[in-house]
C-alpha cells in the first residue's frame, strides 16, 4: 500500500510528513535569503519562510500539554543548528497563516528568538486540517494512550471515519484502534492514571476485559498501591471474571439463584479474586476464596482483619 493510499489525504500529507535531510538556515542570520512572504501564494507546496507573528495556532491541535524542559532543549538546538524540519501551515488570509502541524517547533522557535520560520504552505479545509493535525501528532509525537484514544475518537466523530478507515490512515490494525477506543470507557480515575503514566497500557488492556467498574477500580487501586506487574494483574482479572456456571443448587428458585450470584459478584469485586459459593438445598454451603501466592493470601487476610 502506498503512502498516499495509506493516509488517504493525497500528496499534501506526504509532503507534511516528509523529513528534510537538510538543516534549514536560521532566519535571524543576516546572510540568510530574504523572506518571500510578500508573495505567499507563489510558494504553495514549497518550503517558504514566513513571519512567526503571522501564524495563528491550530484550533484542532489534539495535544494540550507541552514539556517545558523539552521545548527549551529544542529551542537551544534551533539556535545552534537551525530548524531541521519545517512546520506546515495553510494560508488563512493576506499574509496570515494557520498552523497545521509543528506546534512544538513553532513554540521552540519563539523561545529561540526567531522572527521567521521555514514552513510548507498548503491549502486545506477544516476537516483536512483536523485530520492532518491528528495524524501528524499520532505518528510523530509521544502522545500518551489517552491522548491517542481521544484523537482516534475525534477522527471517527469529526471526520466521519470508520474504524477500518482510521486504521489505514494511522497504519494500525483495527484491533489496535479498538483497544485504544475502549480506554475511553474506563472510569475517569483509571483514565487519569493512564494519562499520568501511573499504570501502563498493558495494565489498561487487562482492566478493559473486566466488565464491572467496581472490580476495575479495585484492581486499579491494587496496581497503584502495590506496583503490580501486568502479569499479576492479568491473573487477578482472570480470577475476578464471573464463572460460566454459578454453583448454586437451588435451580428452581431464580430469585434465590440471582441473590447468590450477586453475593458472589460483590465478594469477587471486594477481594479482586473469583469467589466461589456452594449452596445446598437446605441453605447450608461454603465460600471459597482462591489466592495466587503467599503475598496474595496476606493481602486477603489483611482485608479480613486476620
Image (cartoon, rainbow, N blue to C red):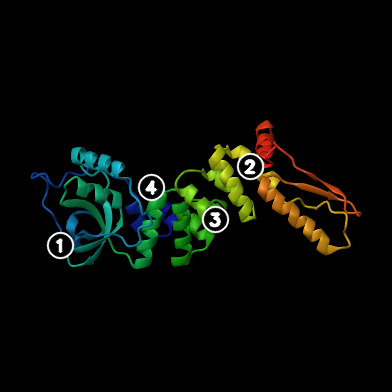
Q: Name the mark nearer the viewer: 1 or 4.
A: 4
Q: Mark 4 or mark 2, which is nearer to you?
A: 2
Q: CA distance from mark 1 to mark 3?
A: 52 Å
Earlier-in-chain disc, 4 versus 2: 4
Instruction: Sort mark 3 into few (<14), some (14-19) or many (20+) by Cα contacts within 10 Å.
Output: few
Question: Quick one: label 1 or label 4, which is nearer the N terminus?
Answer: 1
Label 4 near label 1: C-beta < 8 Å?
Answer: no
SS under mark 3: loop
Which residue is found at the position 47% from the left and 66% from the top? 157
Real-space CA distance between mark 2 and mark 3, rounded to the nearest whole angstrom? 18 Å
Left or right, 109 with respect to 263, comes to left
Residue 297 position in % (x across, y down): 69, 35
- In this view of the protein, which residue sits in the foreground, 184 or 108? 184
Residue behind mark 1:
39
Which residue is painted at 60% across and 46% down in the image?
Answer: 219
Going from N to C along the chain, the mark reached first, 4 or 3, is 4
Residue annotated with mark 3: 187
Label placed on residue 141:
4
Residue lying at the far right of the rendered structure? 282
- Report the front residue among 187 and 80: 187
Q: From the image, which quarter does the C terminus lie in? A: top right
Instruction: Name the outermost residue toward the top.
Output: 294
* SS class, disc 2: helix
Label number found at residue 234: 2
Amino acid at each position: 500500500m502506498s503512502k498516499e493510499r495509506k493516509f488517504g489525504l493525497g500528496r499534501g500529507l506526504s509532503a507534511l510528513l516528509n523529513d528534510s535531510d537538510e538543516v534549514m538556515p536560521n532566519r535571524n542570520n543576516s546572510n540568510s535569503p530574504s523572506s518571500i512572504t510578500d508573495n505567499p501564494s507563489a510558494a504553495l507546496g514549497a518550503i517558504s519562510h514566513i513571519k512567526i507573528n503571522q501564524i495563528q495556532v491550530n484550533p484542532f491541535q489534539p495535544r494540550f500539554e507541552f514539556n517545558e524542559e523539552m521545548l527549551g532543549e529544542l529551542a537551544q538546538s534551533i539556535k545552534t543548528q537551525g530548524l531541521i524540519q519545517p512546520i506546515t501551515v495553510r494560508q488563512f488570509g493576506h499574509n496570515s497563516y494557520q498552523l497545521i502541524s509543528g506546534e512544538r517547533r513553532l513554540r521552540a522557535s519563539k523561545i529561540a528568538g526567531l522572527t521567521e520560520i521555514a514552513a510548507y504552505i498548503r491549502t486545506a479545509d477544516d476537516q483536512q486540517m483536523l485530520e492532518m493535525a491528528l495524524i501528524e501528532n499520532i505518528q510523530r509525537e509521544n502522545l500518551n494512550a489517552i491522548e491517542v484514544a481521544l484523537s482516534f475518537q475525534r477522527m471517527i466523530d469529526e471526520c466521519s471515519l470508520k474504524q477500518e478507515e482510521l486504521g489505514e490512515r494511522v497504519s494500525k490494525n483495527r484491533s489496535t484502534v479498538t483497544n485504544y477506543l475502549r480506554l475511553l470507557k474506563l472510569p475517569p480515575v483509571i483514565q487519569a492514571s493512564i494519562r499520568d503514566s501511573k499504570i501502563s497500557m498493558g495494565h489498561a488492556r487487562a482492566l478493559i476485559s473486566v466488565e464491572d467498574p467496581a472490580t476495575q477500580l479495585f484492581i486499579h487501586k491494587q496496581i497503584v498501591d502495590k506496583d503490580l506487574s501486568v502479569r499479576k494483574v492479568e491473573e487477578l482479572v482472570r480470577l475476578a471474571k464471573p464463572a460460566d456456571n454459578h454453583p448454586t443448587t437451588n435451580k428452581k428458585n431464580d430469585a434465590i439463584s440471582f441473590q447468590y450470584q450477586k453475593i458472589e459478584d460483590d465478594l469477587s469485586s471486594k477481594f479482586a479474586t473469583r469467589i466461589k459459593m456452594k449452596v445446598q438445598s437446605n441453605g447450608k454451603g461454603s465460600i471459597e476464596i482462591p489466592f495466587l501466592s503467599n503475598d496474595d493470601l496476606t493481602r486477603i487476610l489483611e482485608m479480613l482483619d486476620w
